[in-house]
Amino acid sequence: MNEHTTHQVAMVTGANKGIGRAIAARLAAMGMTVVIGSRDPRRGQEAAAAVRAAGGDAHAVALDVTDLTTVQEAARWVEERWGRLDVLVNNAGITGSGKVSPEDAHDQVPSSVDLDMVRAVFETNVFGVIAVINAMLPLLRRSPAARIVNVSSHAGSLTLTSDPDGPFAALLPSAAYTPSKSALNALTVQYANELCKDGILVNAAAPGFVATDSNNHSGYLTPAQGAAVVVRLATLGTDGPTAGFFSEDGLLPW
């Protein structure tokens, strides 16, 4: 049954907690119909119920970005209900080091890293984004002004992380999480270049050091604060930028 709506429809992956949930809540508060993608269906339903309890329109769908079957099923599910997608936020991501902040990830040092971990991180943070975008593109192309936002990290900036006097000089070298976000940034530019002719704006966002499960809540920003730049990019006007990398403070270097 197709529930055609005049509201914009947004999908946020990995949205059952943390930054993703904050993004979903904010988009719903702005009047969008929000689809919460979650690997754990129960947690996804709980997050959607919380957004609805706050007055928003939210629905949960099982979505594991590393499982192409669930990705394609989620796309069909959205098509059956709304027939289009206006906003896609690729938020799902992993550090590869469990509940350890990338700053303390000793197991990611390039000379001793486990290749299986690197593959797992890229499977979610890079290949999963490709899978989701490509599955959702037919729906995004039906929107008059579709927006794609890839949730990256300051650590993905080659300029910032290669500066010996910069704020990231103290970070441990990483062969998994950090380069996966650099790859995501590069991917963002390539999609932006391809889709600009369709009026689809594609940008990467760095939420900042947000307190989440992945860093044992050691970050100094709240999920809502981290979500702000993502929401801004998800709601850009027709004259908005594309192929950019942004934090809440503005444009970041690649």
Image: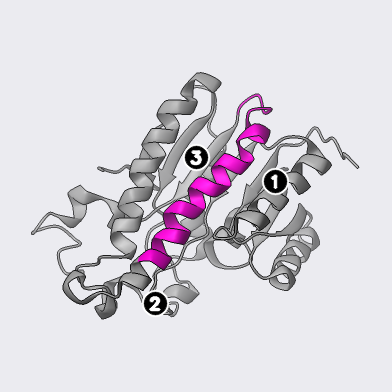
Residues 118 and 154: in front is 118
Crowding at mark 2 (Cα within 10 Å: few <14, some 14-19, many 20+): some
Mark earlier in primary sequence (2, 3): 2
Residue beneath disc 3: 233
Mark sitting on residue 221: none
**Is residue 142 shown above or below 150?**
above
Say which residue appears at 74% left-offset and 59% top-offset.
Answer: 60
Q: Determine the residue positioned at 79% across, 55% down.
A: 55
The picture quadrant where one finds residue 17 is bottom right
Judge whether residue 45 can be spotted in this image.
yes
Q: Which residue is mark 2?
A: 218
The number of numbered discs placed on residues in the rendered structure image is 3
In the rendered image, the vertical position of residue 80 relative to residue 93, given as above or below: above
Amino acid tagged 2? Ser
Front tag of 1 and 3:
1
Residue 230 visible from this viewpoint: no
Q: Secondary structure at mark 2?
A: loop
Image quadrant assignment for residue 146: top right
Circle 3: residue type: Leu
Gap between marks 1 and 3 measured at Cα: 22 Å
What's the CA distance linking mark 2 and mark 1? 35 Å
- Which residue is disc 1 drawn over? 75
- Specify the segment rendered in magenta: 119-145
Say which residue appears at 44% left-offset and 39% top-offset: 203
Q: Quadrant of the C terminus?
A: top left
Q: Residues within 10 Å of mark 3 (few under 14, many from 20)?
A: many
Relative image position of residue 250 (x, y in whole percent): 35, 41
Q: Is residue 18 above or below residue 254?
A: below
Amino acid identity at mark 1: Ala
